[in-house]
Image (cartoon, rainbow, N blue to C red):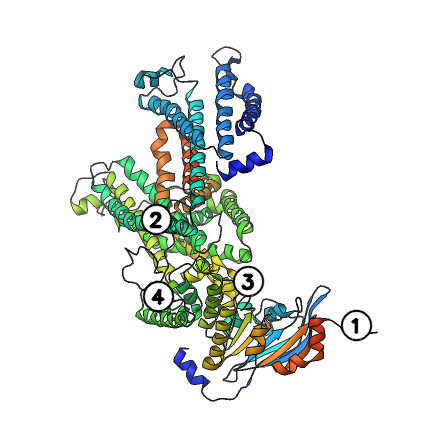
């Protein structure tokens, strides 16, 4: 009997099963109230007939059975009985979720026919599923997994509670070391794969474009990581700098006719100036307050872009941004008179893939530059000051560190990389509008940083692959895409609350030799 | 400044005035936290500031180190080369940067997530910032920065040895035991190369053995580096043993000022600590 169980027992003197049953009963009532109208009736608009409805009381009944059952398991878990929740949760997940995946694989997803549950029955030969329609199955499946995950974390916590302080520290140390070594190994592998990929046979247009998109977010994540991960300034309006970069690029390119490599540093500079501009008013703010102001700033930029008709062309956006050239050689089948195109210069067959692959390499190198600069900065006094500022601003001031300059450089650096990414976005799309710079983008970039593990470069890359790549891969799942996506995110945060690869490598070690296999700090 | 240089400086020179406080008053609304306090703290001396709880000791520190702007009064810091700084007019961080006043905090304020060695490197920020050409040269791999960093690391290691933290150099500062954190905070303050070190209750929470070690450390710092130390302390065994000069505050007012022996015998101090003798 665990401590939690004992405490609950002593306080109420009722059986944990009774407590759980009571909660389940209450949950059943709530589920009934919620689902009877929303799930129980579905409106139907058939051609040439008045609006009618169909009843789906079977779905309501299944909800009233399954949801309180999950609640029952969670209530038991809370009182120290975790194993049933773990086992039943996992079984439920594989059973219910499996039906959706199988339906997707066999291509019958969305066909809400009378007995679709038979798909699983047919494959594994089990009893018919409590199948209603895939969406409800998916919700129940994710719910089961959620129950299992919670039970698992309770069990793990309980086991850790029995360990001595040293054992717990050792475990923590081991976990950190694991994350550290994983980053060290994964980093070069990821880079190598990214460099080689366009030459592999799988590299079709769709894949390279998806990877280009992912890399854009990797770069944005790394840029935001400077502000949020290193300097500890929670910025919810990061997309504003992305927008400034993209729009500066578009204006320089369209109005002044400058080329990509000339516009790129200018756009970065513009974004950095905006970073400083935002930095000034928020110098005194921290945490939630800073988040709110930066959020407002992000929206301000977007609204200005939408309404400053004469300059930004409003919601219609700016089009006709000249396409990227290979250092002056255009990627065109038939270049204008007197110029040479990329494939002619190199004497190869023309392919539309060439431009896409070149764009891919441009963003790859931009992202790697961002990474390289960030790693360098961390080991310079400014980087240490950023981290010190995150830890304790008062102590920083007492040590003679100028907090104003330190914060502003963090904002400027982060914004500059967003500006570069924005330039790339503009040249890739050839068209930009305020639509692309909504708050959701900021939220995704921030999620990438948090999910990756604040301050971890490899973690951010992995998170970007997950958060941007997964929805692309799951595109076939159409409607259920976001459901999977959200579920996966909740799971990851339950599993690794501090991010995928949360570890912090000191920027300087007493003894720099043997840094890779360092197992334990000297006792 | 390296340790060797500091030692040179300490060779045979008489004490001179380091810090002059003139009519310092600090009001928070209607509350007078410090009321017209004037005193002098000398170079190469440990000046103890004592007083019952709420006497205004920490407020005084916050005024010196720029966290508060005093309502009335002047705080003059004079360097050995004769340059003067009016601390009450300076921005908080400039007091550390230019006037070279370092401090520790009553509730320890280390960079808990950073390693012990990094804490000492951050303390040398301004020096390294210049060496790295305000980041630009450092980013380009300028060799001058690398030597500056190596030298900064040497200084940090010298301090780690002195405060017996060599074995913990790569551990997060927050994971150290309490006494070690106190020592690290002093080492970090010293790494900024100060002329005045302000310690806010450094012995709080230390056991008698650690407390004795701290005494020795502070005396060593005074003698070897020839800097002035301002010390707020409740532990009388620390203050009376190592202070050259003690200032006693009560309700924001200075009630006594002198050597430990003088202060101990002062009836005003006894009254403040033990309460007024009842009159018939």
Q: Residues within 10 Å of mark 2 (few under 14, many from 20)?
A: many
In the image, A67 versus A166, the foreground residue is A166
From the image, state whether disc 2 or disc 4 is nearer to you: 2
Name the secondary structure under disc 3: loop
Which residue reaches farthest left? A347
Q: Residues within 10 Å of mark 3 (few under 14, many from 20)?
A: few
In the image, A506 versus B97, the foreground residue is A506
Distance from Cα at disc 2 to Cα at disc 4: 29 Å
Which residue reaches farthest top? A49
Q: Label 4 belongs to which residue?
A: B138
Q: Label 2 belongs to which residue?
A: A179
From the image, state whether disc 4 or disc 3 is nearer to you: 3
- Callout 3: residue from which chain? B
In the image, A292 versus B56, the foreground residue is B56
- Callout 4: residue from which chain? B
Distance from Cα at disc 3 to Cα at disc 2: 32 Å
Q: Quadrant of residue B263?
A: bottom right
The answer to whether residue A445 of the structure is visible from this angle is no
The tag earlier along the polypeptide, 4 or 1, is 4
Picture coordinates of residue A273 (x, y %)? 46, 57
Tags 2 and 4 on a common chain = no
Distance from Cα at disc 4 to Cα at disc 3: 35 Å
Q: Label 1 belongs to which residue?
A: B278
Mark sitting on residue B107: 3
Q: Residues within 10 Å of mark 4 (few under 14, many from 20)?
A: many
From the image, state whether disc 2 or disc 1 is nearer to you: 1
Q: Residues within 10 Å of mark 1 (few under 14, many from 20)?
A: few
């Amino acid at each position: 009997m665990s401590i939690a169980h004992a405490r609950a027992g002593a306080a109420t003197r009722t059986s944990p099963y009774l407590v759980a049953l009571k909660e389940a009963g209450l949950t059943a009532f709530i589920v009934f109230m919620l689902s009877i109208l929303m799930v129980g009736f579905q409106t139907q608009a058939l051609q040439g007939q008045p609006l009618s409805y169909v009843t789906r009381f079977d779905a309501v009944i299944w909800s009233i059975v399954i949801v309180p059952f999950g609640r029952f398991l969670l209530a038991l878990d809370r009182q120290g009985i975790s194993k049933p929740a773990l086992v039943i949760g996992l079984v439920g997940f594989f059973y219910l979720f499996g039906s959706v995946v199988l339906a997707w694989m066999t291509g019958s997803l969305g066909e809400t026919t009378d007995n679709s549950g038979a798909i699983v029955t047919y494959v594994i030969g089990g009893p018919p599923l409590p199948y209603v329609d895939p969406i409800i199955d998916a919700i129940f499946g994710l719910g089961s997994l959620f129950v299992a995950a919670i039970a698992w974390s309770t069990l793990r916590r309980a086991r850790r509670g029995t360990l001595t302080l040293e054992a717990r520290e050792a475990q923590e140390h081991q976990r950190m070391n694991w994350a550290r070594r994983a980053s060290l190994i994964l980093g070069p592998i990821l880079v190598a794969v990214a460099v080689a990929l366009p030459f592999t046979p799988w590299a079709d247009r769709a894949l390279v474009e998806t990877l280009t998109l992912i890399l854009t977010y990797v770069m944005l994540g790394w840029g935001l990581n400077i502000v949020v991960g290193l300097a500890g300034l929670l910025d919810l309006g990061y997309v504003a700098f992305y927008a400034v970069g993209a729009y500066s690029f578009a204006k320089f390119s369209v109005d002044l006719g400058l080329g990509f490599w000339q516009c790129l540093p200018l756009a970065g500079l513009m974004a950095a100036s905006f970073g400083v501009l935002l930095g000034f008013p928020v110098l005194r703010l921290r945490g939630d307050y800073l988040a709110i102001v930066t959020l407002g700033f992000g929206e301000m930029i977007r609204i200005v872009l939408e309404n400053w008709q004469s300059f930004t062309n409003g919601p219609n956006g700016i089009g006709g941004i000249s396409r990227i050239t290979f250092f002056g050689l255009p990627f065109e089948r038939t270049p204008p008179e007197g110029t040479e195109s990329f494939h002619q210069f190199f004497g190869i067959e023309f392919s539309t893939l060439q431009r896409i692959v070149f764009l891919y390499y441009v963003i790859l190198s931009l992202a790697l530059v961002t990474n390289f600069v960030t790693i360098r900065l961390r080991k310079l006094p400014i980087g240490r000051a950023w981290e010190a500022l995150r830890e304790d601003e008062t102590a920083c001031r007492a040590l003679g560190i100028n907090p104003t300059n330190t914060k502003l450089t963090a904002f400027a650096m982060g914004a500059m990389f967003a500006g570069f990414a924005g330039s790339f976005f503009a040249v890739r799309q050839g068209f930009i509008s305020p639509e692309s710079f909504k708050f959701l983008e900021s939220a995704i970039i921030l999620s990438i940083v948090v999910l990756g593990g604040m301050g971890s470069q490899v973690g951010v890359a992995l998170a970007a692959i997950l958060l941007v790549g997964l929805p692309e891969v799951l595109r076939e799942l159409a409607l259920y895409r976001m459901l999977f996506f959200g579920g996966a995110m909740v799971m990851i945060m339950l599993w690794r609350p501090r991010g995928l690869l949360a570890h912090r490598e000191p920027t300087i070690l007493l003894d720099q030799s043997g840094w890779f296999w360092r197992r334990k700090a000297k006792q | 400044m390296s340790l060797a240089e500091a030692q040179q400086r300490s060779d045979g020179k008489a004490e001179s005035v380091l810090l002059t406080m003139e009519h310092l008053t600090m009001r928070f609304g209607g509350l007078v936290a410090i009321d017209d306090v004037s005193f002098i703290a000398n170079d190469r001396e440990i000046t103890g500031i004592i007083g019952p709880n709420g006497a205004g000791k920490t407020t005084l520190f916050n005024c010196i180190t720029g966290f508060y702007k005093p309502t009335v009064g002047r705080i003059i810091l004079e360097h050995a080369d004769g340059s003067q700084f009016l601390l009450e007019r300076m921005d908080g961080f400039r007091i550390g940067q230019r006037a070279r006043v370092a401090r520790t905090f009553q509730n320890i304020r280390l960079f808990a997530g950073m390693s012990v060695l990094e804490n000492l490197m951050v303390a040398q920020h301004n020096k390294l910032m210049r060496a790295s050409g305000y980041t630009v040269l450092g980013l380009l791999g300028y060799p001058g920065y690398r030597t500056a960093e190596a030298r900064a690391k040497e200084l940090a290691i010298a301090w780690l040895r002195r405060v017996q933290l060599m074995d913990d150099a790569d551990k997060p500062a927050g994971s150290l035991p309490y006494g070690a954190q106190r020592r690290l905070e002093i080492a970090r303050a010293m790494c900024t190369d100060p002329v005045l070190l302000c310690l806010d209750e450094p012995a709080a929470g230390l056991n008698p053995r650690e407390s004795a070690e701290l005494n020795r450390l502070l005396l060593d710092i005074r003698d070897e580096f020839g800097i002035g130390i301002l010390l707020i302390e409740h532990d009388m065994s620390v203050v009376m043993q190592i202070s050259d000069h003690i200032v006693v505050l009560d309700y924001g007012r200075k009630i006594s000022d002198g050597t430990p022996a003088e202060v101990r015998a002062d009836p005003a101090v006894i009254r403040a600590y033990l309460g007024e003798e009842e009159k018939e």
